[in-house]
Image (cartoon, helix red, strand yellow):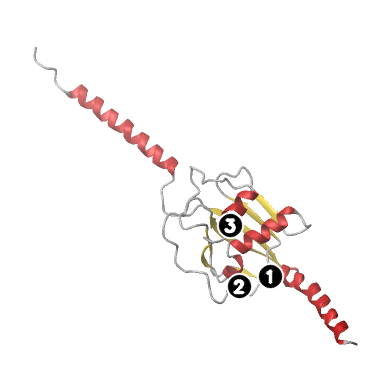
Amino acid sequence: MSRAVFCTCLVVLAAAVIPNTALAKGASEATIVGPGLSAPIELSAFGGSETSGQLADIAQSAGFFPQVFGQTPDPIASDRPEGQLGPRYTITYGMPGPNNQRSELVQDVYPYAEAGPVTYMEPGQRFWTTQRTHGGWYVAAWQPLKEQLVATGLPATAPIAGGGDDGGVPWILVGVLAAFGVAALAGLTAAGARRRPAAAS
């Protein structure tokens, strides 16, 4: 066999093996839920559909691979980023594994965070029976994660009400508390007016 034929065979073999390896180590489907969505967003890596490319792009931008498998140098932080995170969305990834195993991993996503899009994956999530996620916080400030999520159906701007898990008070609760305060103040004022003695004529 000539050297040229041998090299060609190696290229063909690599092309056949690499997609299967990438698929085994990545997510085959994902579901996104959160505020402002009328229904869960379903993404799939099968069938060559538009969502196939969207799923791969989102996983890459969201730090899925270093959060799951670890990476050197490690871009994952153990501490929560500073600033407001905004509404929280949840992505549940379905991962095919060896021996027809299917595992699910959960990632929290904050597309509208002050520091840029932020994701969090709980460390120690089990997958493929014996494997566990590296986990931690990932700041995707230089990744087009927000735009990719908006393209799937998320609101272009942060929803006004709720969904946040950043320690802040949802705006709708602020409004309710403010209205309650105004009503209470008005009641106290009216009670004081009733108790005030009439001025002598």
Q: Which residue is mark 1?
A: 25
Is 99 situated left or right of 5 in this image? Answer: left
Q: Residue at x 41, y 60 (%)?
A: 82
Position of residue 46 relative to residue 175, above or below, is: below
Q: Amino acid at mark 2?
A: Phe
Q: Position of residue 30 (x, y in %)?
A: 66, 57
**Does dot 2 land on a helix, a strand or a loop?**
helix
**Does dot 3 land on a helix, a strand or a loop?**
helix
Q: Position of residue 172 (x, y in %)?
A: 44, 40
Q: Position of residue 134 (x, y in %)?
A: 56, 71
Alpha carbon separation for disc pair 3 and 2: 20 Å
Q: Position of residue 37 (x, y in %)?
A: 60, 45
The residue most toward the left is 200
Check contact, mark 3 vs mark 2: CB within 8 A. Answer: no
Q: Which residue is mark 2?
A: 69
Q: Earlier in the sequence, mark 3 or mark 1?
A: 1
Which image quarter holds the C terminus?
A: top left
Q: Amino acid at mark 1?
A: Lys
Q: Nearer the viewer, residue 11 or 187?
A: 11
| Residue 84 sits in quarter | bottom left
User: How would you rate the neighbour count of disc 3 (Cα within 10 Å): few for under 14, some for 14-19, many for 20 or more?
Assistant: many
Q: Which residue is mark 3?
A: 145
Q: Nearer the viewer, residue 116 or 66?
A: 116
Alpha carbon separation for disc pair 3 and 1: 20 Å
User: How would you rate the neighbour count of disc 2 (Cα within 10 Å): few for under 14, some for 14-19, many for 20 or more?
Assistant: few
Check contact, mark 1 vs mark 2: CB within 8 A. Answer: yes
The residue most toward the right is 1
| Residue 6 sits in quarter | bottom right
Q: Nearer the viewer, mark 3 or mark 2?
A: 3
